[in-house]
Image (spheres, coloured by chain):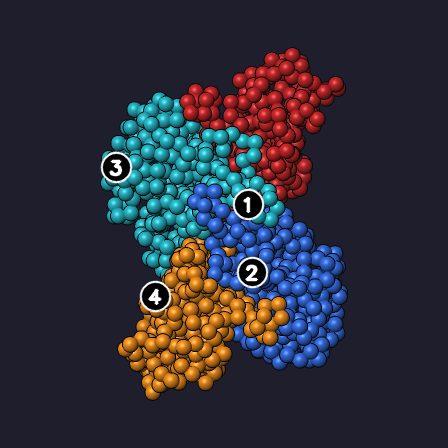
Chain colours: A orange, B red, C cyan, D blue
Amino acid sequence: MMTAVAARELRDGEVVFVGIGLPNLACNLARATHATDLVLIYESGAVGAVPERLPVSIGDPALVTGSLMVSSMADVFQCLLQNGRIEVGFLGGAQIDRYGNINTTVVGDYTHPTVRLPGSGGAAEIAIHARRTVVISRLDRRAFPEAVDFITSPGHRINGRTRRELGMPGAGPTKVVTDKAILEVNPLTGELVLTALYPGVEVAQVAAGIGWALRSRDRLSEVAPPSQRELHLLREVLDPKRLYLKQ
Amino acid sequence: MMTAVAARELRDGEVVFVGIGLPNLACNLARATHATDLVLIYESGAVGAVPERLPVSIGDPALVTGSLMVSSMADVFQCLLQNGRIEVGFLGGAQIDRYGNINTTVVGDYTHPTVRLPGSGGAAEIAIHARRTVVISRLDRRAFPEAVDFITSPGHRINGRTRRELGMPGAGPTKVVTDKAILEVNPLTGELVLTALYPGVEVAQVAAGIGWALRSRDRLSEVAPPSQRELHLLREVLDPKRLYLKQ
Amino acid sequence: MREAVAAHVRDGDTVVIEGFTHLICFAAGHEIIRQRRRELTLCRLTPDLIYDQMIAAGCARKLVFSWAGNPGAGSLHAFRRAAEGKGPALVLEEYSHFGMVARLSAGAARLPFWTMRNYMGTDLPRVNPMIRSVSCPYTGEVLATVPALNPDVTIVHAQRADAQGNAQIWGLLGVQKEAAFASDRVIVVVEEIVDESAIRADPNRTVIPGLIVDAVVVEPWGAHPSYAQGYYDRDNEFYIGWEKISRDPAALARYLDEFVYGLRDRAEYVEKCGDLERLRASERVCAGVNYGF
Amino acid sequence: MREAVAAHVRDGDTVVIEGFTHLICFAAGHEIIRQRRRELTLCRLTPDLIYDQMIAAGCARKLVFSWAGNPGAGSLHAFRRAAEGKGPALVLEEYSHFGMVARLSAGAARLPFWTMRNYMGTDLPRVNPMIRSVSCPYTGEVLATVPALNPDVTIVHAQRADAQGNAQIWGLLGVQKEAAFASDRVIVVVEEIVDESAIRADPNRTVIPGLIVDAVVVEPWGAHPSYAQGYYDRDNEFYIGWEKISRDPAALARYLDEFVYGLRDRAEYVEKCGDLERLRASERVCAGVNYGF
């Protein structure tokens, strides 16, 4: 369901920088439903990709065949991302904190990590340059600490400083889609707050999966469940092998 | 004859940055005679060009058809020239001075020129980066002043400073081929000195075409006249329309 | 073309019509002259005949360039008259080719400057204060810099594009890509519009993505007298003949009256030029490659 | 390949085997392992399985990278063991993808550094002192810099090249061009050698010119288990299976014995892998373009 909800965050015709995993699935679902003119850009260089199969990686050959353009990676990062052409960036992360800072580098101390994660890849620059980013992650206290162990992708407050103060062009993670609720940034405080619940989910259940005193917007909206069509596309068409859909 | 002599300056297999006009003709003559494996690179982006007709400009379509690679101009200047891959650069110029500085920008004052010339094009960076440059120009007091009105392409001494002091990677204009003689740089003084005469030419005739007190190497060599083959290629094959061969 | 120029090229704009010898969009230049745009800052590595004509027509306030000659034929006399104080005033800002390429590269990357190892020993920085320097934070080496060039509008001629402006170019690439990405508005002019499927069949040939394009114009022979690889050859006679025309202001004015002001559009120009078929390219079609997986 | 690696890859070298998911030269990595090179500084945006294998084999002293995972399948456990202090020591130097691309771009241009608007708010500069900054000489803006990366040797896998190494690549280009131009020595490995005339028929496809290439090696299936667009698909089962192998040092050692040390060359590898034909690419050949004039 999280994937279907994330897909709805994309508007038709938008230029999206697609990350690996669930974002990949969400973008392809959006393209198959309400956003047929979505322009999918992968950091690997494929622009306007129309994959005939669910890409296993962001460098899948199916992203190239039938795409509008293949750019060198230098052009992707300089002429598309740094140039400000990316409207939405999709990010995931092992840790997301109160201010939307994301960690995909290490759990624990950098020099002596308890868990070594893959690192930034393009995440740092996507978080800085995409006009807005949408984050997808399952709720879990370890995944939503008060503060991340390492800031790979900056959110809304870094040691108390705002994105504008630090000179970041993009608006940062405006929404965090989880498997139980949606969090959105409070533009005044830069803090992630609860704004919508999945059907049948209680605020307490959400709070239990968050490592800080979660604030809620006064009136919470309810997230519409995925339609039969969305579920069918996800399970039967896009990811029949359950490459990304674990549950 | 000047063109044939210039062509002999190229060794087989060398990577040459080809300029417009006589250099273009000289490089194609060299390729047709002793340097069949010469790699011709044009600032327009054609690499390993094998023009089927004499290129009218350095952007002639005949330079592309059948070439080994077409580079963007950014790659030409950054990855080939600044990278140090160009072994020989060919330059011409309206003015060449005692130290091999070349002016292709203005005659007279820059802001109020008596003659406005085309400007640098790629000449400034070729003079700075090519491992060595060969200059072609007809002898004439106006063409060989004591000091140029404007330094477009730096030679061996600029206000008394050497190329090394100024941080230039290339060796600069090691030879100047004229229609009466060949001048070469004196590595100690950075000055152009007379080293070879065309058949039947007197030192005085050369000195008359030079705007400074021309020094000569002790033993002057004589330039071999162009062979029948060279003349035939130039006049009948390469430039039958006399596009470049004025006399 | 009329609509595209009317909508995207405004008086006072910084305008780039790029193309290094190849794919120079004369069709756009002529339409800008016809619509009497004024006070333009014209930028090109090689102003070429098109900017000589626009200067003569009074469109330009300033010229930013690196080599202002008539390749293989002589001078650009409208430019020279202005530069030598014998014609209407024209502000000049001059770089080398590398400098202009670097300015557009910085513009395309939306960085404020670009770094090069260049200009030591030349007089260019003396006459152009925009050529500056920066110290390497690792080696301390002092390197030359040029400022980003971000045009208001860039006009790129390409062999083909789809209706969205996904444009494919082969042959000399010049700085078409950098100029388009550096620009606020982009007009793509093509020899032919092709179906999106033709673009998608060979995505590595796409140089400019439609997502940065504001207008697409189909203008066959739109680059004449320059050329389009695989479509038509350069009209070298015209380039050689320009020496005589541009040398004489009256003759230049007559040319503009006859071939620009006197015509409604490119179609009329093509007709008036007469036998352009003599320039039609020969067939040298390469083999395709396999994009299968 | 044996001769190329023996001649151009030396103990202690800084080595780049590039290719972003596409065209990763496992054939070269295996040969380097077989020849027991030591103390290498391995650089790649995505170390991928090939560097996980080289790390496990003890070839590496240092790793320079930006994303060290098994794309779509899990972790690189030899890398993780080293990074988490459970395996042989490995020095790490870490950037983001943009940072690595910029390092190679600087190297290719032979500039000492490259400028980006990046890293503000991230912890990367805190743990990597090579990420520094420079002030714009025009705007005063403080921008991030990374130092040039100039490898001793770069190994590029391409679909095809001629005997001189003029190499053509289509599909994902990664940073193959930048890595080759940045390197002191270049080895080009191809799926097939073609006649020079085939390269000259479509010069816009050429990514690496022979004039910078030191050795050309023909190695069909040389990129397996990664892929070569138009030749064979990625072996995703192998990537998924690597999770299990690399998780267990003993299993990893067995893999190396069986598929690297135990084999003489790539031909034996291809034979041992058995049915690679299942990965053979389908036919999706694009049309050619006209280079005539």
Q: CA distance from mark 2 to mark 4?
A: 27 Å
Q: CA distance from mark 1 to mark 4?
A: 44 Å
Q: Which residue is mark 3?
A: C36
Using a 10 Å C-alpha cutoff, classify the residue at mark 2 as few (fewer than 14 neighbours), some (14 to 19) or many (20 or more): few
Label 2 vs label 1, nearer the camera:
2
Q: Which residue is mark 1?
A: B78
Label 2 vs label 3, nearer the camera:
2
Q: CA distance from mark 2 to mark 3?
A: 56 Å
**Secondary structure of residue under mark 4:** loop
Q: CA distance from mark 3 to mark 1?
A: 38 Å
Chain identity of mark 1: B
Q: CA distance from mark 3 to mark 4?
A: 48 Å
Tell me the amino acid under the disc marked 3. Arg
Same chain under badges 3 and 1? The reply is no
Residue C162, compared with residue A135, is above or below; it is: above
Label 3 vs label 4, nearer the camera:
4
Label 1 vs label 4, nearer the camera:
4
**Which numbered tag is attached to residue D126?**
2
Q: Position of residue C48 (x, y in %)?
A: 41, 35
Left or right of D3 in this view: A5: left
Whether residues under marks 2 and 1 lie with C-beta atoms below 8 angstroms apart, the answer is no
Chain identity of mark 2: D
Task: Name the residue located 34 percent from the left edge and 46 percent from the top edge.
Answer: C153
